[in-house]
Image (spheres, grey):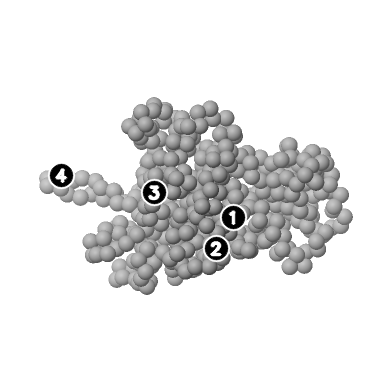
Amino acid sequence: MEIKRDYYLNKLIEAKCDGLIKVVTGIRRCGKSYLLNNLFYNYLLQNNVKENHIIKIALDDSDNEELLIPKNLSRYVKEKIVDQEIYYVILDEIQLVENFEGVLNGLLRISNIDIYVTGSNSKFLSTDIITEFRGRGENIQIYPLSYYEFMSVYSGDKLDGWVEYITYGGLPLVVSMQNDERKMSYLNEQRKNVYINDVIEKNEIKNDSELISLIEIISSSIGSLSNPKKLSDTFKSTAGLNIDHKTISLYLKYLEEAFLIEKVQRYDVKGKKYISTPYKFYFSDLGIRNSFINFRQYEENHIMENVIYLELKRRGYNVDVGVIEQKERKENEYIYKQLEVDFIANKGNNKIYIQSAFSMPNPEKINQEERPLLKINDSFKKIIIVKDYIKRTRNESGIITMNIFDFLLDNNSLDF
């Protein structure tokens, strides 16, 4: 079963021969190796690149053990370059090579070489890996399957597919599994022996129970405003544990660096400035999130919000949470209230304000969702995404309402 990852494939194609090391990063098991070794490799062949001009090495293959020695790997690649045509070097699991940064920087000095690498241990999953290449690398982060990608290989209808997707997430291998038991077992195994271990080993965490408890708290409150101080208070009130907010800040940083969670800051729309705290967290994969809480908490409205966030990120948007402060008169005094816009999506000069509303069954709910958008005095698009199956509409105020399936299944749904 081949799953197309056209968005990421096109990013690799656009970056061809730009003089930079293409570093493919993302949460473990999201399809980094498949993207390079299958999809991109086949693209090159189909576009008349000679097979002997693609140097593809799986460094976790025991047959290539000698290439884990830096000098051997460097020599092997250089010996393959016998003319002035472009050579594409694809190195999988590069982190297995000691001082791989030096090897890659050395190869980059060869004028007719184009380098692509991926890796899957805790060091290579770090978001700061690009700094190892002294400004000569570019990060291409990939996410687990989007709902659109998921549905391209799912045999049922979109409603059944939605339930499956928000329950078990988008790790490619999960999609190929045939029953719930296997999927849950796989996700639990990855959660315990891969994702948590990566964070613990890299950061030499001694008290892993604190870390796991923190992830469980975040898993239970996706899309809720939080900060280290609030999380510290939650530990104290629910578990009787005193965990310093500075320790929690470190744990959150470690989880972000491993791409398990993403922090989203709040942005003051009228004041045009960021608000440092509180902020929101979303998970890179819902199946892993659900595994942390034993698949027992099913809050579809918050899960839908997470899905929308991931889709915006997949489409290349920078995403913030919008805050609109307004002054209201109450009795004989004025009070300040904050209205929230779920997402402000930015890409270049394009900006879109988006509300996630699971359902809008009555005028009161419609007014509640529209109110923050109506307080924004600019001409950028304003959209409400709902789970209700309705046709796309635009009201007299210019606010678009569309259903979640039209949004997710049409890659151009925001281009109107």
The CA span between labels 3 and 2 is: 25 Å
- One can see residue 108 in this view: no
For residue 333, which numbered disc appears in the image? 4
Do labels 3 and 4 touch, CB within 8 Å?
Answer: no
| Label 1 to label 3: alpha-carbon separation | 23 Å
Q: Quick one: label 4 or label 2, which is nearer the N terminus?
A: 2
- Name the residue located 50 percent from the left edge and 55 percent from the top edge: 180
The residue that mark 2 highlights is 149
Disc 3 marks which amino acid? Answer: Gln
Gap in Å between the C-alphas at discs 4 and 2? 53 Å
Say if residue 77 shows up in the picture. yes
Relative vertical location of residue 311 with respect to residue 253 in this rendering, above or below:
below
Q: Are marks 1 and 2 in contact (CB under 8 Å)?
A: no
Circle nearer the viewer, 4 or 2: 2
Residue 350, position as x, y percentages in the image: 46, 61
Direction from residue 399 to residue 281 in the image, left or right: right
- Mark 1 and mark 3 lie on one chain; the one further toward the N terminus is 1
Q: Amino acid at mark 4?
A: Glu
Image quarter of residue 88: bottom right
Q: Would you name the residue on which mark 3 appears? A: 297
Are the residues at dot 1 and dot 4 in contact (C-beta closer than 8 Å)? no
Q: Nearer the viewer, mark 3 or mark 4?
A: 3
Residue wearing tag 1: 173
Q: Residue at x 29, y 48 (%)?
A: 338
Q: Quadrant of the C terminus?
A: bottom left
Separation of marks 1 and 4 at Cα, in angstroms:
59 Å
Tell me, yes or no, whether the two marked residues, 4 and 2, touch with CB atoms within 8 Å: no
Q: Position of residue 143 (x, y in %)?
A: 55, 53
